[in-house]
Image (cartoon, rainbow, N blue to C red):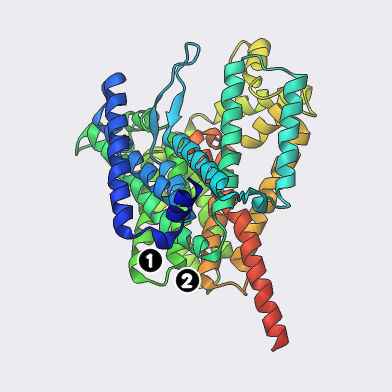
Amino acid sequence: MKKIFDYFYKKNNLSWIIKSLFVILIGFLVGKIAIYLSNYLEKLQPSQLIIIGTGLIFFIILTISILTKNGVLAIAAILFSTVLGRQGQLEIAGRTPYLFWVEAAVITIIILWLIRASMSGKITWRKSISGVDTYLFLYLLVILGGLLIYPPIDYLRTGAILKTIFFGILVYFLAKVFINNKSKILLFSKLIPLTTLIFIGQFIYFIIQRFGLHFYYGTYEFHAWAATSWGRSNYLAAFFALFFALNLGVFLSERKMGWKIFSGLMSFSSLCFAIIISSRGAFLSIIIGIIFYWLFLPGKTIIKTSFMLFLILILLLSPLSEYTISRFSTGLAGRAEVWRDTFNIFLNYPLIGTGIGNKGFILLEKTGEYDPTAHNFILRELVETGFIGTFFLLLFYGKILIESFRLSRNKFLDRQIRYIFLGVTIALIIGFSHALVEPNLMGEQYRALFWFLLGFTAVSGRILHRESHKIIKENIVR
């Protein structure tokens, strides 16, 4: 069995003809399974069939990726599956949590990776551990300690939150496992625009399916629909805000005109869709991202300022923004009240917090209102993991953000690499800024993409600093 696996494991022994036949075979088997499931479950809607069909393609890619020892396709599958939406619902103790495509994709990757590792006798995950992960492990220890001291009030809710937390960490380490050389770092500049295109395509399809060819953006009806379709409105806009920054970095880095135009179009489209959805948090975070682009972007100040003013004018003066700007006069008092109540609970549990998932029930006991979210990721960590847990998590986030910024300013690296990480740096800033007013970091799919960026940055720092040190030594010898 091992000899057979080794034969197909080597790229040279698996011709493109065999690969194509293998795709057809796997596609046939997976299709049969999908038909069986669709007959077993309730009748699927056309939009669900499109999502499932797209997901099946990436599961096929995953299988070939593992068999050909090609982490590139596994990386693509993680990114693409983050924007495929929901796969369906599960019935657990009378509740119906969602199953997302990215969850199924990541589980598939892990299973196939373990099979590959057991067959080859090599497990490379230890190489993915780095110094910054110490803060992450300490953060997890605080979480586990908090659970022992303050047991969950609702085990299902605590379990769901823990699943989301550990899922993000899992994606983080998978990114560090599969990204192991410079070529895969550069591949990132191709995958991000393609991922954005998939996301935009789905969103447009859902809009047309719901409203037809004539829909009215900038209305409460459209905003309410966006809040319940693919995901919450702030959740959708959070994706578009990230893609705006990432694609802009790719646009600046690309030398080939075709990819430059494509990534630029994806960046501008993401900006427009983020405005259309009317999320105030995304709107503000994009403005913050544009300002940081102006600060960090090398070049003449006049050109940078003109570019920044152009983007901000689009945000402020475009007809797309009217409804978003009008929403700033409402809802701010509600946010301030949530922040105040959350902080007051933190003052009663300052060291290790209330324990994961308990905040809403403690608030219910004190005020008679149940609200499990804090609408601010720092306050959420403070109230559930205390000062100690929040301290370690912010150290972890801060180290990676600084690493991304350092890579964007490293003169010994290629210009293309520097601009890619300029985009990643701004994307992380946008993500953190948006998370100060919304709970988007706890969304399953968004968390997968965001923590993939964290893992991508952490492992790239190790790979690229090694290369820059080599260049410095060569220059010294000369």
Q: Is residue 478 visible?
A: yes
Q: From this viewpoint, which residue is outermost toward the left?
A: 213
Q: CA distance from mark 1 to mark 2?
A: 18 Å
Q: Is residue 331 above or below residue 401?
A: above
The residue at 41%/72% (across/down) is 255
Looking at the image, residue 32 sits to the left or right of residue 406; the answer is left
Toward the viewer: 121 or 233?
A: 121
Describe the element under mark 1 as helix, strand or loop.
helix
Q: Quarter-wise, where is residue 320 in the image?
A: top left
Describe the element under mark 2 as helix, strand or loop.
helix
Q: From this viewpoint, which residue is outermost toward the bottom?
A: 478
Looking at the image, residue 329 sits to the left or right of residue 122; the answer is left
The residue at 69%/27% (across/down) is 384
Residue at the disc numbered 2: 303
Residue at the disc numbered 1: 260
Location of residue 64 in the rendering, given as x and y in whole percent from the top left corner: 40, 49
Q: Is residue 85 above or below residue 131?
A: above
Callout 2: few (<14), some (14-19), or many (20+) C-alpha neighbours within 10 Å?
few
Toward the viewer: 84 or 32?
A: 32
Q: Quarter-wise, where is residue 312 in the image?
A: bottom left
Location of residue 343 in the rendering, given as x and y in whole percent from the top left corner: 70, 27
Looking at the image, residue 32 sits to the left or right of residue 301; the answer is left
Toward the viewer: 110 or 416?
A: 110
Amino acid type at mark 1: Lys
Amino acid type at mark 2: Ile
Q: Are marks 1 and 2 in contact (CB under 8 Å)?
A: no
